[in-house]
Image (cartoon, rainbow, N blue to C red):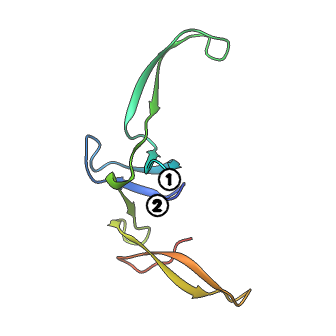
Amino acid sequence: MKIKKDDTVVVITGNYKGKSGKVLKVFPKDGRVIVEGVNLSKRHSKPSQANPQGGIIEKEAPINASNVMFLDPKSGEPSRLGKKVIMDDKTNKKRRVRVSKTSGEMLS
């Protein structure tokens, strides 16, 4: 899975198409991600010590990673991600970095 936590992504299909947000959590085994403000589900909770008022709580639910696309920080458009091998100047070892396909900008 090429999408990681704290990436900014845009939803490309489904009910939340066009919405963008930060990735809060990634589930690589399931191929799902939780995106901030996307796919909200409501849960009714009883009053407890942690939540004395109780009521309805809105929480993000996971969506399939194939339904989101990385948002290029340079152009602000959806982009695919690739990998590139570069030489690290400090350690003189090869290192793999993520690269945006549209702008060619190196990420992490």
Number of other residues with Cα within 10 Å of mark 1, as a class: few under 14, some 14 to 19, many 20 or more:
few
**Where does residue 1 sit, x and y in percent of width and height?**
46, 61
Does 7 sit left or right of 12 as displayed? Answer: right
Q: Is residue 55 above or below residue 5?
A: above
Q: Which residue is drawn at 34% across and 55% down?
A: 66
Q: Which mark is residue 28?
A: 1
Residue type at the position of mark 1: Pro
**Where does residue 81 sit, x and y in percent of width and height?**
41, 70
Q: Residue at x 63, y 11 (%)?
A: 48
Whole-angstrom CA distance, mark 2 to mark 1, is 6 Å
Does 92 sit left or right of 4 as displayed? Answer: right
Image quadrant in which you'd find residue 87? bottom right
Q: Which residue is drawn at 44% across and 46% down?
A: 35
Q: Please give the residue where the numbered disc 2 appears in the rendered image.
A: 1
Number of other residues with Cα within 10 Å of mark 2, as a class: few under 14, some 14 to 19, many 20 or more:
few
Image quadrant in which you'd find residue 52? top right
**Where does residue 25 sit, x and y in percent of width and height?**
53, 47
Residue type at the position of mark 2: Met
Q: Who is closer to the viewer here, 85 or 103?
A: 85
Residue that protrudes farthest toward the right in the picture: 91
Q: Which mark is residue 65?
A: none
